[in-house]
Amino acid sequence: MLMRAIACERLKCKGTLIWPAFLLIPIIPVILGCGNYLGNLGLLKSAWYSLWTQVTLFYANFCFAPLIGIYCAFLWRYERFNTCMDALFARPVSYASIYLSKYLMVCFVTALTQLWLAVLYVAAGKCVGLPGLPPAAIFLWIARGAVGGFVLATIQFFFASAVRSFAFPIAAGLVGGVSGLIAAGSQLGIFYPYSLMILGMNANRSEDMLSSHTALFLVLSAGYILLFLAAGISIISRREPQK
């Protein structure tokens, strides 16, 4: 039943603005990062690592979390029209399957976004004249960033399901990204959910911020995902029909 629900959500995403946002928005921080890199060649001497610091300065701190918010908002947007929500929950599908199918679709697009970032980053590096390919560590940081992105997706999907506002999960992503940047600089930053993506991606750093804390990062990520999934399923299970 869950797989059929996922297939249904995939069909709903066709023709929506999720895909233009997915393709176009990540290009902006990459262009800004390249501009910063080329403007500071006298200071940035670590080649691919230096370019990474500049790209993630904009992408991880100001772009990725609001973009995930856009994905979450669109997955609930069309259910808000007229009595579409009542029709959705009248189907012989459990509340958990409906919620999880939408959430997993958000995670799928989030993972694709990280892959798209990797392509853009490599292409940008070649355009600015960097030799060879990026170090393997950077691709690990991109993968860890996807895990942190799943945490953000869980939280912002919870907001999108609970609040009848398209803009709210997007605004939450923007505020969360900035607050996560601030918290990531503290010793307890790893315990703040919006810092997990920034720490995972090693945003604006060339040395690994997680270092020996990767296991804690994964445990906390799994914990936040399970917590907000349970809360979200619980809330929609108690919803009242629309008037």
Image: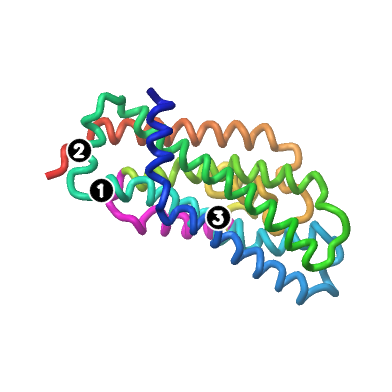
If you read the primary sequence from the N terminus, does the residue marked by circle 3 or circle 1 appear first? 3
Residue 79 appears left or right of 207: left
Task: Give the alpha-carbon distance from disc 3 to disc 1, as whole Å.
Answer: 25 Å
Left or right relative to 203: residue 111: left
- In the image, the segment drawn in magenta is 162-181
Q: Mark yes or no: residue 10 visible.
A: yes
Contact flag, marks 1 and 2 (Cβ < 8 Å): no
Residue at image coords 27%, 30%: 237
Q: Is residue 68 left or right of residue 85?
A: right
According to the picture, the residue beneath numbered tag 2 turns out to be 86
- CA neighbours of label 3 inside 10 A, class few (<14), some (14 to 19), many (20+): many
- Which residue, given by chain and number where applicable, does mark 1 sit on? 80
- Give yes or no for contact between labels 2 and 3 (Cβ–Cβ under 8 Å): no
- In front here: 127 or 72? 127
Image coords of residue 107 (percent x, y): 51, 40
Q: Picture coordinates of residue 56 (x, y %)?
A: 66, 59
For residue 192, say whether it is visible: no
Circle 3 sits on which residue? 64
Amino acid beneath label 2: Asp
Furthest residue in direction left, as rendered: 243
Does the magenta run of residues contain 177? yes
Residue type marked 1: Arg
